[in-house]
Amino acid sequence: MIIDSSTMESEDEESLLGQESEDENSELSDSELQEAFAKGWLKPGMNVLVDKTKKHVNNVEGLKQCLAGFRKDLPWAERLDMTNLPAEDVIYKAEGKKPAVKIGDVNPDDDFQREMFFYRQAQATVLDALPLLSKHGIPTKRPDDYFAEMAKSDQQMQKIRKKLISKQLILQKSEKAKKLREQRKFGKKVQVEVIQKRHKEKRDMMTSVKKFQKGMTDKLDFLDGDQKKPREPSQAQNKVAKDNKKGPNAKRKYKDQRFGFGGKKKGKKWNTKESHNDVSGFRAKVANAKGAKKGAKGGKQNKRPGKSVRKKTKSRS
Amino acid sequence: MSAFKRKRGGQAPGNKKAKKAKFVADTSEAPKENEQEKTHEITVPAPVSQGKWKNKERVLIFSSRGINYRTRHMMQDLRTMMPHSKADTKMDRKDKLFVVNEVCEIKNCNKCIFFEAKKKQDLYMWVANSPHGPSAKFLVQNIHTLAELKMTGNCLKGSRPLLSFDPKFDSEPHFAVLKELFTQTFSTPRYHPKSQPFVDHVFTFTINDDRIWFRNYQIMEEDAALVEIGPRFVLNLIKVFQGSFGGPTLFENPNFTSPNMHRRQIRLAAAARVREKQMVKELQKLKRAGTKEDVTIDVTADVFLTPADETPVLIQTEAPEPKVVKKNKHKAFKRQRMARK
């Protein structure tokens, strides 16, 4: 045991140490303490047991001698050993990242990085060694007709191949399943749309037939069937431009008028001179429409014919 | 095995793989080749190495008792990979370690790889240069064998390996000794009778996290495309000795904790955590109990006391008179009253 005596300078430290040393000193028997005192080891002040730091053997001289003793100076062709850093990380370079991996920087817990480090070290060895091997006349490529026993049996290789194939199959299956699911969703959507379209067409047909019966229209255009006029791209553009020009929706406009900018002012007159003279609601096209298109906005498409005409058509149908 | 494994073109004189020599390695080929021999004229095969095999390096690979299946398979894999190796039966643990030297001598081997299993959990590996040379003891971890399906590479049985070392092996003297030891042990001698002339795999030794990582890759293409063959393991250096399986210690790894110590530390840590939790619980209990004080004196008792006027104390010495009970004065019952009316 080593007894270390500290001076009385830092009293806080000592009180702490004192607690520890009390416990430890209580383990020492009185006789031992008396002996130590007699020998002069114990000095006034706090005495603390200190652990001797364990010395690890590192006999450099011995190691070097040993190495010199047992090393065999064989030609390289016998040993085939290389010492090198790992090869350039191609992937890192391609991504533009700086390879932060030097020896000692590899995180041993990062499996992928670590294994890649070993792989690249082997690669560098192979790249450096191949010219040397060819120089010494040691072949690396097996000729095609050279068959010999391999380290792993054929059965083993078959198992490995099967495993790889099964992995690939699983992957393919899962991909197929995903695609099918997507298709089904999409297909369902398309189906729903088609059905809705059909319903809509039927509804429209019925309404136009009823209108004709009631005498609201005297045209039989709807019987011609779905003859969609081929829309030119300019027409489509025009349509889009027109929509943009008309500004917000009629609904939006109405709501703005009623609730926008503080809402309707109370007690305002309704039928005034200004409102009478206001012709902003007049749409010349709609008013003078003779054979307007189905999709035309604003106003009634087909004006209701007069009583006599209606009677005539009614009796006729 | 199937027919395609037969070697064709094996009659060339330059090919030292004479059929007789291959008998040991390809036992399955033997019957077919014997038939062939009978049909052709009998040629005296050339001596195996044609006198070129100079580097007589032999490695004895064996183990003690009590190893588990993974270790056993790894040992067999090493024997497969190293054609210059010899096998031996399991050594009894009762014998002292320097008996291994004698076994090596008997087998005429000058290197030894000895696996020692303790507690059926920990595996130690000794790599030694048998008669006089240095030896090293390692703790082996993370063993993966050849038979694992993730190791997809394959190589010729007995082909010579390239050895690849980390530059760190040159930095420290103990690593330099280890490097020399590994080089001599793992490299197959040229023109060894059981070896194949091609070099198609590479052993890698890398130092990382104060351990030596061993990997074995197959060289697929000339542009260094590699596939792992296996086996793979991690060596944790414990000590380097000057003699074989004994002798003065030349180097001791300061960062090495024995697996027992490691397990003990884990257990102590767990125990310490439990104790801490208990202490914390107790402290909390005390706190809760401690704050409750027995209220004996109500401090607020005399808040509403108003001093009253002094009244003379009247003491009654005589008992008070009994109260006259005014009972019903001859009042008849109601019914009778009604009847009277």
Image (tube, rainbow, N blue to C red):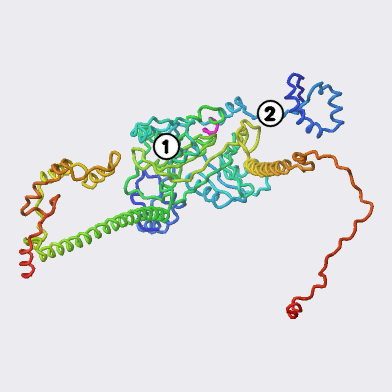
Please name whichever residue, A28 or B6, is drawn nearer the observer in this view of the structure.
Answer: A28
Q: Which residues are magenta?
A: B176-180
Image coordinates for residue B187, horizontal then vertical, percent = 48, 38
Instruction: Report the residue that reaches farthest toward the right.
Output: B317
Which residue is depicted at the point 80% across and 73% down?
B331
Looking at the image, residue A147 lies above or below residue A120: below
Distance between mark 2 and mark 1 Cα atoms: 40 Å
Which residue is depicted at the point 30% across and 55% down?
A182
Queried whether the magenta region covers residue B4, the answer comes back as no
Please name whichever residue, A55 or B240, is drawn nearer the observer in this view of the structure.
Answer: A55
Image coordinates for residue B169, horizontal then vertical, percent = 51, 30
Residue A178: image tag = none
Magenta stretch: dominant secondary structure: helix
Disc 2 crowd, CA 10 A, few/some/many (<14, 14-19, 20+): few
Please name whichever residue, B47 or B300, is drawn nearer the observer in this view of the structure.
Answer: B300
Image coordinates for residue A168, horizontal then vertical, percent = 35, 53
**For the residue marked with disc 1, what is the amino acid?**
Ala
Residue A122: image tag = 1
- Element type at mark 2: loop
B208 vs B259, left or right, is left
**For the residue marked with disc 2, what is the amino acid?**
Thr
Examine the rendering and report whether any part of residue A136 can be seen. no
For label 2, the residue is A53
Between disc 2 and disc 1, the foreground one is: 2
Whether labels 2 and 1 belong to a single chain: the reply is yes
What count of labels does the image hold?
2
Examine the rendering and report whether any part of residue B252 can be seen. yes
Chain letter behind tag 1: A
Of the 4 image quadrants, the one containing the N terminus of chain B is bottom left
Instruction: Report the residue that reaches farthest toward the front.
Output: B341
